[in-house]
Amino acid sequence: MKLTLDGINKKEEWKGYKLPEFDIPAMVAKTKEAPVWAHFGTGNIFKAFLCSSAQDLLERGIMDAGITACESRGIDSVSRLFAPHDNLCLSVTLNSDGTTTKEVVASVGEAVSCALDFKRIESVFCNPSLQMVSFTITEKGYALRDAKGNLFPVIAEDMNCGPNIIYSDMAMRAELGKDLGVNSPEVSSVPNHHLMSVIITLLLRRKQACGAPLALVSMDNCSHNGEKIENAVKEIAGEWLAKGMITAEDMEYLTGKISYPWSMIDKITPRPDAKVEASLIEDGIEDIKPFVTPNGTYIAAFVNAERPQYLVIEDDFPNGRPALENARGIIFTDRDTVNKVERMKVCTCLNPLHTALAIFGCLLDYKYISEEMKDTELVNLISKMSSEEGMPVVTDPGIIDPRKFLEECLKERFPNPFMPDAPQRIATDTSQKLPIRYGENFKAHIEKGDVLELKYMPLVIAGWLRYLLAKDDNGQVFEPSSDPLLETAQGMLEGIQLGDSVTEDKLSGLLSNDVIFGTDLIAAGLGKKITGYFNELNAGVGAIRSTLKKYCTE
């Protein structure tokens, strides 16, 4: 069985798989002629959620054009993922009852790479039919500065060279890449540019070509995502304006005709799982082996994900938009409501629980979140933390019930034994997540006047400090997940060994860091409690389990 257009025409071979029923060639032609939706970041959540949603609307005749999938770095996704499979992918839904739903998704009408197809991407941007450009490039994709607040060198260079040089470089790289190969010395000698700089350059080309408005929609799982992309655009373009590289009219277009809707996205999409891969191979499907892209993304021609999904988007689309509200789990609303939904999820009902499971899962050597949900103390920890400390200060968005959302996480999503999600994956970039996932709740309780009564959130913070020592509960060394502040945070605990008992002063430098925790936990009065928890967790081999038993029993 080949995952190609010719292959899926042999429908008798694809028993148990839902196949596309719309006219794929007509959709492809429409997408190329009049693109409506372009997307950067062609990873797992793109295929599992956005492509599947577009497929549903294509099936029902609500959409007639597909998605233009754009690869911002390299050519691996286009050359190794999309092209060999005629832009098809397999979506495998891992249901909590053990069943799987398998579907061939054909909603990508065109797949292009900045490295080879920059002129084509420019033509997509310049087409007045284009209504939105969406992104799932992670929060790092919008960042212009490092942890110390300094501009990244690539951004500083972009600000100096301006949009015309960036455009020339991108066009030159693509042309040379086609002739000589993207890894040739000649191509490598052409400067790289930050995606945000490239996007602004493309927007300015659109202004010159048609002047039509457009929405840039971040669908990344980070707080105030629309604001992040808007701020990046304004800062880069503002520097160009100050240097006379763009006009006041250009700046007005970027700030007045381009919208930056906020969104909240939620769907757990782990990396392609070996068991799922094996089952697909057993079915007879060929050429679906996962691979890792140069930027570290683990992808395959299939994606496995849970069934629950939520995408709440601010309805601010100045050139119109696809009717995505007709797809499952997608809601359009106002910015304030998006913000409330995001706060509900990120500060109370899902993300703080995930972080707690990630930290203690690594310390207790768990490999799957679902296995942790069989651990009485860990289940009690996240249940009590969310109900006793989160719910009293939860933000209720009105369109989603916080208690039902939380119950779905605790009863269906996290315990799903068929979801191969790992605490080590979720522990990635923990220092970047704590200010929102925990800091906002700490600040709410400070304002409420009961912060000193908190028990479980301080225990999780102490657990993270213990995690930074990089020894599990058996005393075995483990490798912490990647984190831009890992080395800095570990340096602030330098000299602490397993079995040591420390004073509050030893931890105060880290606990007072309001960048990491969103607030000064020493000033909040939590230093003594967190230090006490840390000493209990660090008392020796088995201390983590005994501490959890002490505080997280029924």
Image (cartoon, helix red, strand yellow):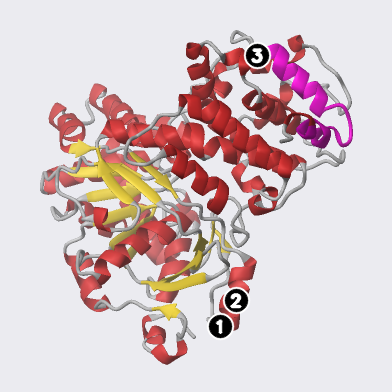
Write the residue at 47% across / 38% down: 140
Write the residue at 33% across / 76% down: 20
Name the front one of labels 2 and 3: 3
Name the front one of labels 1 and 3: 3
In the image: residue 101, left or right of residue 335: right
Amino acid identity at mark 2: Ser
Q: Nearer the viewer, residue 400 or 65?
A: 400
**Which residue in the structure is indicated by mark 3?**
526
**Which residue in the structure is indicated by mark 1?**
283
In the image: residue 365, left or right of residue 84: right
Q: Nearer the viewer, residue 203 or 172?
A: 203
In the image: residue 308, left or right of residue 169: right
Marks 2/3: CA distance? 50 Å
Residues rendered magenta in the picture: 526-549
* Badge 1 density bin: few <14, some 14–19, many ≥20, Cα 10 Å: some
Q: Is residue 162 above or below residue 527?
A: below
Q: Nearer the viewer, residue 427 or 15?
A: 15
Image location of residue 129, percent across then percent down:
14, 56
* Badge 3 density bin: few <14, some 14–19, many ≥20, Cα 10 Å: many
Q: Which quadrant of the figure has residue 345? A: top left
**Which residue in the structure is indicated by mark 2?**
279
Image location of residue 194, percent across then percent down:
40, 40
Write the residue at 50% across / 48% down: 408
Marks 1/3: CA distance? 55 Å
Q: Nearer the viewer, residue 263 or 532?
A: 532
Q: Is residue 158 above or below residue 330?
A: above
Give the dominant element type of the magenta stretch: helix, strand or loop: helix
Amino acid identity at mark 1: Asp
Q: Pointer 1 and pointer 2: residues touching (CB < 8 Å)?
A: yes
Q: Which quadrant of the figure has residue 405? A: top left
Q: Is residue 228 above or below residue 168?
A: above
Amino acid identity at mark 3: Leu
